[in-house]
Amino acid sequence: MNRPAEALLTALLAAHRQGRRLALLFDYDGTLTPLQPHPDLARLDPSARRLLERLARRPQIALGFLSGRTLKELQTLVALPEAYYAGTTGLELDLRGQRVVHPEAPNIAPSLAQLGQRLQRILPAYSGAWLEDKQWGLTVHYRAVQPDRIAALQTELQDVAESSLEQFRFIEGPRAVEIIPRLGWSKATAVDFILEALQQNLPSPVSGEGPGVRANTDDMVILPFYAGDSVNDEDAMEKVNSLGGLSVGVGPQAPPAAAYRLPNPVALHDLLTRFEKSL
Ligand SMILES: [Mg+2]
């Protein structure tokens, strides 16, 4: 942990020079954009989008975006057609035109609606808290709640979480809790989906092993890179670590699984700028 930007740039450039394909995967909020008082305000900086667009056009580089936001919202915010997307913490994906939704997701709708109603009864006592209904998941946002009310709200949410643990994961984010049906899909499985789709699109497989991502080999064709800022990025980082890739924590709340550290989204932008200039 805590390896600096310099080492990260060196690792990216070395992989590129070895002819490996780079899968540059990013969380959105807090990673590509600074956290905002309201999620509607988290817009991607135009210069960052242009940089990502130029990187995506390079044949050796593929881009992916993984978020707790809905797939539709994420695609609207990032707005890069040549990319892979995973929304609702990996439950819905767009693999460059191939749409994938967890087949069990529709069956969970009644219990999700019930849980939403339960939360709606709690939240009015906490001014500034609100519930986002994401079709396949829920998010309780509390960035605008008075600081002295937050602990009480967290305790109430914890009670709800404990009584619905079998069906739902409650993932603590920066002043928000994501609630995702426990269906076995996550940001980690989204990383797998994206890498597998990429592997299948490679012009010539290196050996006769066929599709699938080979782990822990120096000659792995694709090098995954994942940048995230909070605990909901931890499983994706662990996945990328297990594949010998580069996991990058952005900001002070990044999970300990991150092998490299950057202080904020601007530092990530700077790193990618320097990477592009060195290509
Ligand atoms: Mg984030």
Image: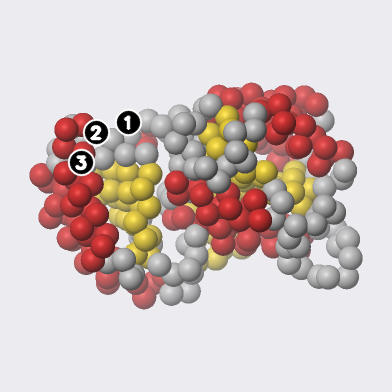
Q: Locate residue 92, reporting x and y percent.
A: 49, 61
Which amino acid lies under the numbered mark 1 shown in the image of this protein?
Answer: Pro
Task: Let me know if residue 128 appears in the view.
Answer: no
Which amino acid lies under the numbered mark 2 shown in the image of this protein?
Answer: Ala
- Asked whether the beta carbons under mark 3 and mark 2 sit within 8 Å of each other, the answer is no
Tell me which label, 1 or 3, sits earlier in the chain: 1
- Residue designated by label 3: 151
Provide the secondary structure element on which disc 3 rests: helix
Which amino acid lies under the numbered mark 3 shown in the image of this protein?
Answer: Ala
Q: Residue at x 12, y 55 (%)?
A: 121
Q: Residue at x 89, y 65 (%)?
A: 207
Q: Locate residue 18, reporting x and y percent.
A: 88, 43
Is residue 168 found left or right of 239 in the rendered image? left
Tell me which label, 3 or 2, sits earlier in the chain: 2
Q: Is mark 3 within 8 Å of ligand 1?
A: no
The circle drawn on residue 37 is: 1
Provide the secondary structure element on which disc 1 rests: loop
Q: Residue at x 38, y 44 (%)?
A: 173
Q: Is mark 1 within 8 Å of ligand 1?
A: no
Q: Residue 125 appears in which quarter of the rendering?
A: top left
Q: Is mark 2 within 8 Å of ligand 1?
A: no
Q: Locate residue 23, reporting x and y percent.
A: 70, 47
The C terminus lies in quadrant: top right
Tell me which label, 1 or 2, sits earlier in the chain: 1
Q: Nearer the viewer, mark 1 or mark 3?
A: 3
- Residue designated by label 2: 144
- Asked whether the beta carbons under mark 1 and mark 2 sit within 8 Å of each other, the answer is yes
